[in-house]
Image: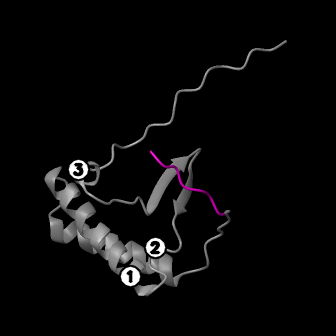
């Protein structure tokens, strides 16, 4: 019988310290690159009162990413944000992306 090679455990980011110390915290989105493909899980009801809040959250994430890139010295924060925004606009307004998925549950710790 063939023995399957062991796989390394997926690399996970630690939750932000602020979430661990908060009175109330909820993970709303997680993104993974697995075998070269994007996989996303999210809690769809998070902004059911106003779906446009997802857009605001993505904008806030873009600013965090641009700041992180600038701290690495590759680009200024403004240059990084411009590149991120341009790619987002191309992706959001371009040909439809093939997506698939299923509703997942939540893990309580």
Camera-side residue of 67 and 52: 52
| Residue under the image location 31 percent in, 76 percent down | 59
* Left or right side of 33 for 82: left
Q: Which residue is at 56% across, 46% downward?
A: 34
Q: Distance from label 1 to label 3 (Cα)?
A: 24 Å
Please state the horizontal and vertical placement of residue 96, each as a whole percent of the image. 61, 78
Q: Residues within 10 Å of mark 3 (few under 14, many from 20)?
A: few
Residue 107 in the image: above or below residue 44: above
Q: State if disc 1 and disc 2 touch (CB < 8 Å).
A: yes
Q: Of the residues tagged 2 and 3, which is closer to the observer?
A: 3
Q: Earlier in the sequence, mark 1 or mark 3?
A: 3
Could you give the CA–CA distance between mark 2 and mark 3, rounded to whole angstroms?
A: 21 Å
Q: Which mark is residue 46?
A: 2
Q: Is residue 109 above or below residue 75?
A: above
Provide the secondary structure element on which disc 2 rests: loop
Given this view, does label 1 or label 3 mark the residue nearer the observer?
Answer: 3
**Residue assigned mark 1:** 53
Does residue 21 belong to the magenta stretch?
no
């Amino acid at each position: 019988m063939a023995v399957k090679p062991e796989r390394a455990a997926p690399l996970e980011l630690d939750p932000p310290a602020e979430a661990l110390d908060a009175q109330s915290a909820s993970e709303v989105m997680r993104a993974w690159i697995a075998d070269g493909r994007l996989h996303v899980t999210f809690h769809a009801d998070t902004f059911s009162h106003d779906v446009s809040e997802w857009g605001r959250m993505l904008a806030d994430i873009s600013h965090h990413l641009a700041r992180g890139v600038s701290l690495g010295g590759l680009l200024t924060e403004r240059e990084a944000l411009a590149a991120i925004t341009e790619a987002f606009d191309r992706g959001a307004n371009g040909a439809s992306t093939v997506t698939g998925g299923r509703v997942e549950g939540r893990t309580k710790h």
